[in-house]
Structures are given as structure tokens and as C-alpha cells.
Amino acid sequence: MPGSRFPAPWSSEEHSHYFVVRDGNGRAIAYVYFEHETRPAIAAKLLTKDEARRIAANIAKLPELLRRQSSHVGGHKGPSKARVRGRILPWSDLGSPFGNAPEFDTRTM
């Protein structure tokens, strides 16, 4: 993505209680925290290590997915879309990141 503020490739790396996603310059762009033990994580509604790993990995894939999407669209200027549980929705239908946004189906990612 030319002129991007967060150049590709993005990567994720594991730390003791979180994953960090970094851009091509090594700048941290996302932190995904987790609880090591599954039961306390579920009880406190925290992410498990596996959930955090998948989220960080999917964030790191965003530049490639956006590049592929723009090359497939062929100059289409319509709204971007996302696949959510087998359905394709415009990004505007995904809801607020702080509200009741639908979950992404990570099995296809």
C-alpha cells in the first residue's frame, strides 16, 4: 500500500501476557492481551492465549487482504465488504468495535 502510514508486512510476536502486531518499520500497532489459564479467562471474559494469537495473526494479515481485495475489485469504488459467518457485509454493517459487532469466522482466514 503505497504511502501507507503503517507499511507492510505486518507481523505478530508473542510476549508473556500479550501479542504485539508490528508494521514493516517495527512500530507497534496493536496489543492483544490474554490470560494463560483457560478457566479464569472465560470466567473474567478475557481472551485465552489461543484466541489472542488468532486475533493478532488476523490483524497482521490485513495489509495483504486489503491489497488482494483492491486488485480483485479492479477499480471498483463501492464500499468495502467483509465476510462474517459466511455472509458478506459492507464494513458499515459491522457495527461499533465497542458495541455488539458480529464475530468473524476465523475458520476461513
Image (tube, grey):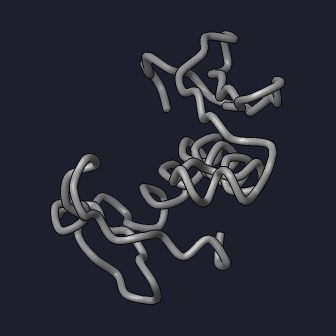
Residue that extends furthest to the bottom in the rendered view of this protein: 86
Which residue is at a point 23% across and 69% down the rendered structure image? 90
Vertical placement of residue 101 versus 105, above or below: above
Q: Residue at x 46, y 89 (%)?
A: 86
Q: In this rendering, would 14 be left or right of 84?
A: right
Residue 105 occupies quadrant: bottom right
As rendered, which of 53 and 4 lies closer to the eye? 53
Query: What is the x, y in percent for residue 109?
Result: 65, 69
- Determine whether, in the image, residue 3 is placed left or right of residue 27: left
Residue shown at 61% from the left, 10% from the top: 27
Counting from the top left corner in percent of width and height, residue 7 is at 56, 22
Q: How many numbered discs sit on the rendered protein?
A: 0
Image quarter for residue 24?
top right
Residue 82 spot, x, y in % from top left: 38, 69
Instruction: Kindly identify the residue that appears in the image at 76 percent across and 48 percent down.
Output: 49
Which residue is nearer to you in this view: 60 or 35? Answer: 35
